[in-house]
Each structure stands twice: as C-alpha cells, then as structure tokens.
Image (spheres, rainbow, N blue to C red):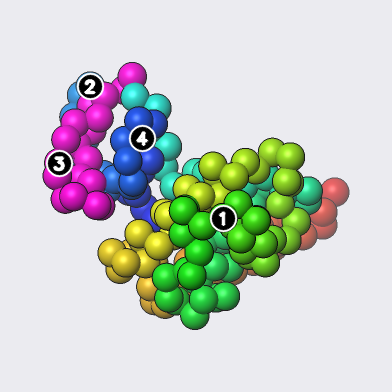
Amino acid sequence: MFLEGILSIAGQPGLLKLVSRKNTSVIVESLITGKRMPAFSTSRISTLEDITVYTYDDDTPLKDVFVNIFNQYKGAITDVTAKSANTELAAFFEKVLPNYEKEKVYMSDIKKIVSWYNLLVEKGIITEESIKEYLEEKAKAEKEAAEAEAKEEKAE
C-alpha cells in the first residue's frame, strides 16, 4: 500500500522503512544510507500514512499532498528543495495545496514535505502505479462510506 511502513523519527534525518518489530523496539532502515538500526518506543515515531496537513476545510492527509505534487510535476522530482528560498517554498506549497492554513503549517513543515517527496520519488516508492493504486482504494472507500451513510439514512 502507498507509504505503508515509511516512518519519520524525531532526531533522525530523512525517512526510514519499517523492517521488523520486536517486543520493545522496531528495526528500521534508513532510505538515505540503507543502514539498519533499532527504534525504541521512547522515540517519537510517526508513520507517513497518519500525518495530515492543516487546511481551512478539513485536514488533508499527507498522501493526498504527495499525489498533488506528483500530478503537478508529472512524477518528477520537484524543482524546489528544502534549501530553496522561503518565498519560493511558500509559492510552491500554495500551488500544491491552496487552502493550507498558513498560520499552522510552518516553513519547516513545508521543507520536510518537499524533501520527503523528493526522496520517495528518488527511491521509487512514489510511482505512477502506487498513486493509481492509492486513488482506486480511496475511491472505493469513499463509495463504501457513502453507501453505508445512505443505508443508515434509509433505516431512520
């Protein structure tokens, strides 16, 4: 599944891939260096699947932001990087997610998203196939939710 097992750990550079689980830790592999290491439950571990970006409507899953970037750049690495000027990064993110909350989404968040996206494309994790698969799963889940809601309304 799209982004399954991809982690961010506070204090660790880049992204990591979940390799295996143990009783008190997980074994992760750096996507940058390929080195494996343990990550303990005391570490602040976030899965990319669970991360959302603040918007004025409803929080947007990071997956959807990556899909927007992928579509905008036709699957290529972005022309902006984490080292680009803040104005350039803000303009980039405004194009990708126009309704993001500028007060809550910090420049450091945008830099992380850009660097994560570029790394995931470079490593072949974000591909046209993975995006297509994710969008099909999302459409199916939305359809099932709408059918369940309609069934619930009918029952009332």
Query: Horizontal and vertical percent for residue 69?
Result: 54, 67
Q: How many angstroms separate mark 4 from mark 1 (CA)?
A: 25 Å
Comparing 12 with 83, the one in front is 83
Q: Residue furthest bottom?
A: 74
Q: How many angstroms separate mark 3 from mark 4 (CA)?
A: 14 Å
Disc 1 residue crowd, few under 14, some 14–19, many 20+, Cα 10 Å: few
Query: Helix, strand or loop at disc 1?
Result: loop
Q: Which residue is mark 1?
A: 85
Q: Which numbered disc flags the more N-terminal residue, 1 or 3?
A: 3
Marks 1 and 3 close (CB-CB < 8 Å)? no
Q: Which residue is mark 4?
A: 9
Q: Is residue 13 visible?
A: yes
Marks 4 and 1 close (CB-CB < 8 Å)? no
Comparing 35 with 18, the one in front is 35
Disc 2 residue crowd, few under 14, some 14–19, many 20+, Cα 10 Å: few
Q: Indicate the amino acid at tag 1.
A: Ala
Query: Horizontal and vertical percent for residue 14?
Result: 33, 46
Residue 33, magenta (yes or no): yes
Query: Helix, strand or loop at disc 3?
Result: strand
Q: Dividing the picture into quarters, in which one does residue 40 lie?
A: top left
What residue lies at 27% left-to-right and 48% top-to-bottom?
A: 17
Label 1 or label 3, whichever lies nearer to me, is: 1
- How many numbered discs sit on the rendered protein? 4
The stretch in magenta equals 25-42
Query: Helix, strand or loop at disc 4?
Result: strand
Q: How many angstroms separate mark 2 from mark 3 (CA)?
A: 16 Å
Q: Indicate the amino acid at tag 2.
A: Thr
Label 4 or label 1, whichever lies nearer to me, is: 1
Q: Which residue is mark 3?
A: 36
Q: Dividing the picture into quarters, in which one does residue 106 lie?
A: top right
